[in-house]
Image: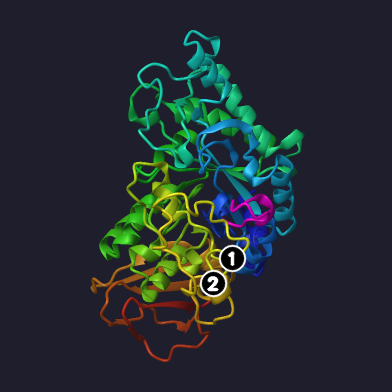
Amino acid sequence: MLTRLLCLTSVALASVACAASTTQAHPLESEIVYQIFPRSYRDSNGDRNGDFNGIIKKLPYLKRMGITSILINPIFKAREYHNYFADNFFNVDPAFGSNSDFFRFIQTAHSLRLKVILDMEIQYVADKHPWLAATLKDPQSSLARNLWTKGSAFYDLNLNWWGGAKIKVAAINPDSPAVLEWAKSIFRFWAAPNGHPQHGVDGFRIDHMMDDLDNLHVKTRMLSKFWLPIEQEIRGIKPTVFFLAEQSDWGTGSDHFKKANVDAVYGFPLYFAIKSLQKEKITRVIETSVKVWEPRTTQFNFIENHDVSRFASIVKNDSRLLRLGAVLNLTLKGTPLIYYGQELGMKGVQGKWNSDANDIPVRLAYRWNRKINAPGTANFYRGTGPWDNREFESDNDGISVEEEDNRPDSLLNFYRRLIKLRQRSPALAIGTEEVVPTTNSSILIIKRAWGKFQTLIIVNLSAQSQTVSIPTRHFTRNLMTGHALKTKMLRLSSYGFKLLGVTTPDR
């Protein structure tokens, strides 16, 4: 089954002899995933909120980029702008459209051969959810047993909610059989609406997936007692569905693979290593992580997401480092995840306003136009507080689709070329990975291989130019230019890189 899935995953890999495909790669590895924060992506009706119709309109743009899957952050009816604490898990936020609009988005994406992954956090409910509303009115309500009311009764997040909302949040009781069945029904609804798996989402991202919920040692063994039964239920209905686990402090995520049988975890260790630009840290993470998630699992590789500072701000908008980050994001083993606007070089750093609006600066409106208030821009936050300070966005700053689309040397077009290269290379898409030893503390060399197909990823992690000897005797060529190399010595510029294709004799 795995071999067949790999053969069907990408047209670009059709030349690979599938009969000989005995790789341990997970089918997700050949996907290119693009994460959308829906309220910030594209506004179709002029209310400054991104919506499903706006996303639908821009699907051809994502298809052109080479994206194969879309991860969409929570869409449920809620009063927080980020929709993570829902009042209703069976209806979408009206600001995004209707349930019909969302399923039309899925249908349109599928018609373009794009998968859809839905971000889920069902471990908490807001105070307009029937369970919490009833419990707040009467703590002895029969519905109170569905909530976690011992040890961590209600969350006091001590926040000034964006928009002035007053919201209480409670954790569900995952030990309750009724709650487990309720959770299963939510996943069934979005995976197979009205019993039709082909009309639903293709996968789920589980936010805050913990074995010991909130590390309070009260609701434990959740991976095996709560999450595994949910996954088994949905896989029985939709065998192709996949589950991605997210939790920032889990290390390699091995427990999630073993206890919950998830398909992928988020590569937080790799993220922190890449951000450090230290060869030793990157090497250690690669050599440790691969042992954990092969052969039946994978990890999502990222350099930014909706919870962390934008990579462009971390590297001070250094064009060399923006490209180096893209190379590490898109060529290492695993599933590449691109956060919306990353490919443009959008900037943003969390604020310190004691509010859930702290993260708005890393969730700013996608820059379709050179003007930050152009029609269609989903700047829902405009004029609502100190997060609208123009520090990270301004007119004509060179960071927009309009300004980068037709500029050959733009970051956007660099991403397009890298994605195309990965999709055409069996070694980069689904190959094995190993760090090639070198005595130079600034040079990182990684070999990706798929049978006779080999790629060398050579990066300079320092601000000084470096000379390196290519560690192979075989014919090599520069994959970015297509030119053959006539020497075994390479000169890498400051924070430079080379992607080399290696032709080896048939075995």
Q: Is residue 276 visible?
A: yes
Q: Residue at x 35, y 33 (%)?
A: 158
Tell me if residue 435 comes above or below residue 109 in the rendering: below
Q: Residue at x 70, y 40 (%)?
A: 99
Amino acid of disc 1: Ala
* Residue 287 screen position, x and y as percent: 34, 56
* Residue 73 screen position, x and y as percent: 54, 46
Q: In which quarter of the view is residue 332 placed?
A: bottom left
- Look at the image and give the residue range highlighted in magenta: 41-54
Q: Residue at x 66, y 33 (%)?
A: 188
Q: Helix, strand or loop at disc 2?
A: loop
Count of numbered marks: 2
In the rendered image, the residue lying farthest to the front is 383
Residue hosting label 2: 370
Residue 129 within the segment the image draws in magenta: no
Q: Residue at x 48, y 77 (%)?
A: 501
Residue 52 within the segment the image draws in magenta: yes
* Residue 404 screen position, x and y as percent: 54, 76
Mark 2, residues whose alpha carbon is within 10 Å: few (<14), some, or many (≥20)? some
Pointer 1 with pointer 2, Cβ within 8 A: yes
Amino acid of disc 2: Arg
Residue hosting label 1: 374
Q: In which quarter of the view is residue 41 placed?
A: bottom right
Tell me if residue 339 comes above or below residue 193 in the rendering: below
Q: Is residue 450 visible?
A: no
Q: Helix, strand or loop at disc 1?
A: loop
In the rendered image, the residue lying farthest to the top is 140
Q: Is 23 or 435 nearer to us in this picture?
A: 435
Q: Is 412 or 504 nearer to us in this picture?
A: 412
> How far apart are the alpha carbons under marks 1 and 2?
8 Å
* Residue 311 screen position, x and y as percent: 39, 62
